[in-house]
Image: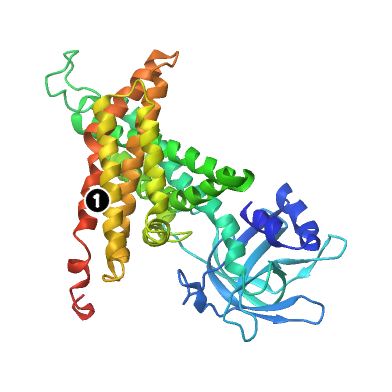
């Protein structure tokens, strides 16, 4: 879907007509080919070359690594979007490179010099082939303008980053369902105040530590769904709205996309580990199934830009680049919204408002010191993103509890309020902890000489 989105946005009409119908039908698959052994997050060092040919196409030579779905036999063709450099150019261009050549009438021709060097042996996601791809004079077709390949790629990158966040969120929800069912069924020990039924052992759901883990997973997962929907709404407004609405949505997309990717996947892994912990020793055994969520979620923190890079983008480009203007606008909107919540706990509203005020103060501290302390943003970005994430989830919990209070299902409304209370009591303060880390600056992080590591 991402490949089709990129081609639709940037390729010429002939390429669209040749490749989009079979991509959208699922007859062909797509792959994004960016990373090379020496050029991962810093793509300007890629060495894959694109030599112009007389017919207007290009000869692509080089290799890529970590290519998800690089090859398989699920579809009859795989359409690669490959980043490569034109002769004498320092910029990066984007090319369509099909595994099998496509004839003028749309039928498949001969193999196109696209081969698999090896398949990576991964920690998780075993069913998805992650490939080393080789291009030996493969014929490619320029997408968009020369040296503007990364701009074209970023058409789909925001959607991909939200999708990766959803992977972490989905695995967290699955882990919760498994762990919750297990906790209500597994008999072990008795309640701290004695068994209510007089049994010699109770379901482990009676134990405070098990409840802590399950409530944490649930609180973070339900707020994560709110973040996902809200971010998706901003993406749609940025794409389909107009005027001031579109402009504001575009600013919020920049603000929220790195948070959706990083916070959802970091907390998603936390959730799967907690879900596994609920199972105790049985959680480490493959037959129970819970350990697969831990393995499969781990990659989501890494691909589409590691979470550290997401955080640096968030703090360095989305928060301080405009001197905290977008964040200030967003916080003002949050505070306006809080005043309109008629059913929310006033104490909780004050807590969330206070956390956002502290967030703004810390953002301005970083902005004021970013030039005199050049390592500050890089060193503190993850803590700042986490602080924002926990503050945002507090706001979303107030919205959800307020809406649920009038729901016709009283059990549903009660559940929302119970979990909202837990979040406010136990998790919101994590935002202030992470802000305290940012306010400590970068001195102790950067002080030790590299050779001492």
Q: Position of residue 147 (x, y in %)?
A: 62, 74
Q: Residue at x 39, y 49 (%)?
A: 327
Indicate whether 23 appears above or below 179: below
Left or right: 7 with respect to 374? right
Task: Tell me if mark 1 has few (under 14), some (14-19) or many (20+) residues whose alpha carbon lies within 10 angstroms of its own.
Answer: many
Left or right: 400 with respect to 53? left
Quadrant in which the C terminus is drawn: bottom left
Report the number of numbered marks. Answer: 1
- Residue 345 seen in this snapshot: yes
- Name the residue that disc number 1 marks: 434
The answer to which quarter of the image holds residue 176 is top left
Q: Residue at x 42, y 23 (%)?
A: 403
Q: Position of residue 257 (x, y in %)?
A: 47, 51
Residue in the foreground of this view, choosing between 147 and 194: 147
Residue in the foreground of this view, choosing between 247 and 317: 247
- Residue 127 seen in this snapshot: no
The answer to which quarter of the image holds residue 317 is bottom left
Outermost residue on the right side: it is 105
Indicate whether 172 appears above or below 425: below
């Amino acid at each position: 879907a991402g490949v089709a989105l990129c081609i639709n946005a940037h390729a010429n009409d002939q390429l669209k007509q040749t490749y989009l119908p079979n991509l959208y039908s699922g007859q062909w698959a797509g792959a994004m080919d960016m990373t090379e052994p020496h050029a991962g997050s810093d793509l300007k060092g890629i060495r894959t070359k694109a030599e112009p040919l007389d017919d207007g196409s290009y000869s692509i030579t080089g290799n890529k690594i970590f290519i998800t779905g690089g090859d398989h036999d699920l579809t009859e063709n795989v359409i690669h979007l490959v980043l490569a450099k034109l002769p004498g150019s320092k910029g990066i261009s984007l090319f369509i490179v099909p595994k099998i050549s496509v004839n003028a009438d749309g039928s498949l021709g001969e193999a196109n010099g696209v081969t698999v060097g090896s398949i990576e042996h991964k920690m998780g996601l075993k069913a998805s082939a992650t490939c080393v791809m080789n291009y030996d004079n493969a014929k490619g077709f320029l997408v968009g303008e020369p040296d503007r390949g990364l701009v074209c790629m970023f058409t789909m990158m925001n959607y991909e980053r939200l999708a990766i966040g959803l992977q972490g969120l989905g695995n967290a929800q699955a882990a919760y369902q498994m762990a919750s069912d297990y906790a209500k069924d597994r008999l072990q020990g008795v309640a701290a105040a004695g068994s209510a039924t007089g049994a010699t052992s109770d379901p482990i759901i009676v134990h405070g530590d098990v409840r802590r883990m399950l409530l944490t997973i649930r609180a973070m997962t339900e707020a994560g769904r709110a973040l996902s929907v809200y971010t998706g709404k901003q993406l749609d407004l940025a794409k389909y709205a107009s005027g001031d609405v579109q402009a504001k949505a575009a600013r919020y997309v920049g603000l929220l996309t790195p948070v959706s990717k990083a916070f959802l996947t970091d907390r998603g892994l936390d959730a799967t580990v907690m879900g596994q912990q609920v199972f105790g020793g049985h959680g480490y055994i493959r037959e129970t199934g819970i350990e697969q969520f831990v393995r499969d979620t781990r990659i989501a923190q890494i691909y589409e830009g590691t979470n550290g890079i997401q955080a640096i983008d968030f703090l360095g480009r989305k928060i301080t680049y405009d001197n905290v203007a977008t964040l200030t606008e967003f916080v003002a909107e949050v505070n306006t919204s809080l005043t309109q919540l008629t059913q929310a706990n006033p104490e909780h509203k004050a807590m969330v408002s206070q956390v956002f005020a502290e967030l703004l103060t810390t953002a301005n501290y970083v902005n004021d010191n970013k030039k005199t302390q050049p390592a500050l943003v890089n060193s503190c970005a993850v803590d700042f993103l986490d602080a924002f994430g926990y503050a945002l989830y507090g706001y979303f919990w107030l919205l959800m509890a307020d809406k649920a209070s009038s729901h016709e299902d009283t059990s549903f409304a009660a559940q929302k309020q119970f979990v909202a209370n837990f979040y406010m009591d136990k998790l919101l303060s994590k935002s202030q902890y992470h802000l305290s880390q940012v306010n400590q600056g970068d001195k102790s992080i950067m002080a030790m000489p590299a050779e001492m590591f």
